[in-house]
């Protein structure tokens, strides 16, 4: 009987333990945060905050809205922030990714492409809250709107000269927006480090993330997660642990 109790006690305790809910705020990015709750960022979170100890409550919102949720304390973790997006105190200690930004331009601009200077005095659009104006000349007319699909349709209709966004998301909408061969995708238009954001009310989550991320990085599991989602190995950030 004592042996049976020793066996059952951990199971009973596990059954009565309530998982800690973590509120996640994120935009939708192909390969990273898909609507079906699959992608690199989600897998990374599941490695660091596994079931049954934790449960992830994911809220899909435009990126700018996710920042507001984090700062107000209505979200515990924000995904996919550049250093300028949120104050340093909210950021993970190390970047989770070395990101690249792509540009879509008409064939006429692509044929004479000389880098970002080719966008001088042109209309350039990106998604709300991305703040990519630092990558284009000061004479560029830079604007932001919420929908990538709308931006690509604006490009097709001649209402903007270039769209800045992520390669996988653009490719997902290429046929739907019927861009065809009249437009070109310039990958690696710009590069930026990406961090996760943590509410200042949840320092415990940040500390666990930093510690577990280090283990994943040093073991090679982080690189394996990138490859699992068909993301280039050069996106693994260079960290000196």
Image (cartoon, rainbow, N blue to C red):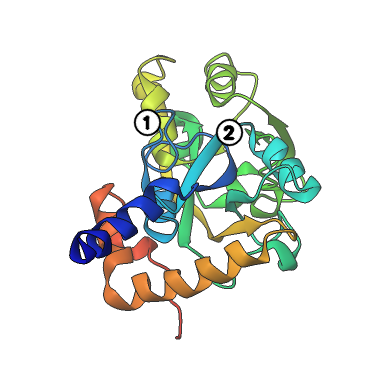
State the residue at coordinates (58%, 18%).
150
Query: Would you say residue 51 is visible in this rendering?
Result: no
Indicate whether 169 appears above or below 100. above
How would you rate the neighbour count of disc 1 (Cα within 10 Å): few for under 14, some for 14-19, many for 20 or more?
A: few
| CA separation in Å, label 1 and label 2 | 24 Å
Instruction: Using the image as rendered, state which of residue 153 and residue 220 is in the foreground.
Output: 220
Q: Quadrant of the N terminus?
A: bottom left
Q: Which mark is residue 171?
A: 1
**Residue at the extreme bottom of the image, as rendered:** 241
Instruction: Using the image as rendered, state which of residue 72 and residue 16 is in the foreground.
Output: 16
Judged left or right of residue 37, residue 130 is: right
Q: Which numbered disc, 1 or 2, marks the residue that appears first in the sequence?
A: 2
Q: Position of residue 38 (x, y in %)?
A: 36, 38
State the residue at coordinates (57%, 47%).
22
State the residue at coordinates (59%, 24%).
151
State the residue at coordinates (33%, 59%).
10
Q: Position of residue 103 (x, y in %)?
A: 50, 40
Instruction: Using the image as rendered, state which of residue 87 and residue 193 is in the foreground.
Output: 87
Q: Quadrant of the C terminus?
A: bottom left
Looking at the rendered structure, the secondary structure element under dot 1 is helix
Q: Are marks 1 and 2 in contact (CB under 8 Å)?
A: no
Q: Position of residue 89 (x, y in %)?
A: 74, 68
Q: Which mark is residue 227?
A: none
Q: Which mark is residue 59?
A: 2
Instruction: Using the image as rendered, state which of residue 221 and residue 152 is in the foreground.
Output: 221
Looking at the rendered structure, the secondary structure element under dot 2 is strand
| Quarter occupied by residue 37 | top left
| Quarter occupied by residue 198 | bottom right
Judged left or right of residue 82, residue 48 is: left
């Amino acid at each position: 009987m004592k042996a049976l109790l020793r066996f059952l006690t951990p199971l009973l305790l596990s059954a009565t333990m309530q998982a800690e809910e973590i509120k996640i705020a994120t935009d939708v990015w192909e390969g990273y945060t898909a609507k079906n709750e699959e992608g690199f960022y989600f897998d990374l979170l599941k490695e660091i905050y596994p079931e049954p100890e934790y449960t992830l409550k994911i809220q899909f919102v435009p990126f700018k809205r996710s920042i507001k949720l984090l700062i107000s304390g209505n979200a515990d973790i924000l995904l996919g922030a550049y250093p300028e997006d949120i104050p340093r105190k909210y950021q993970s200690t190390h970047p989770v990714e070395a990101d690249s930004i792509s540009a879509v331009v008409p064939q006429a601009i692509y044929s004479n492409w000389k880098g970002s200077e080719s966008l001088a005095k042109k209309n350039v659009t990106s998604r709300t809250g991305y703040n990519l104006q630092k990558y284009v000349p000061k004479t560029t007319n830079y604007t932001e709107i919420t929908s990538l699909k709308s931006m690509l349709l604006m490009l097709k209709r001649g209402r903007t000269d270039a769209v800045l966004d992520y390669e996988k998301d653009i490719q997902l909408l290429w046929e739907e927006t019927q861009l065809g061969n009249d437009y070109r995708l310039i990958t690696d238009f710009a590069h930026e480090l990406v961090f996760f954001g943590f509410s200042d009310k949840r320092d415990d989550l940040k500390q666990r993330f930093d510690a577990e991320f280090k283990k994943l990085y040093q073991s090679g599991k982080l690189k394996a997660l990138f490859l699992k989602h068909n993301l280039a190995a050069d996106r693994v950030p260079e960290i000196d642990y």
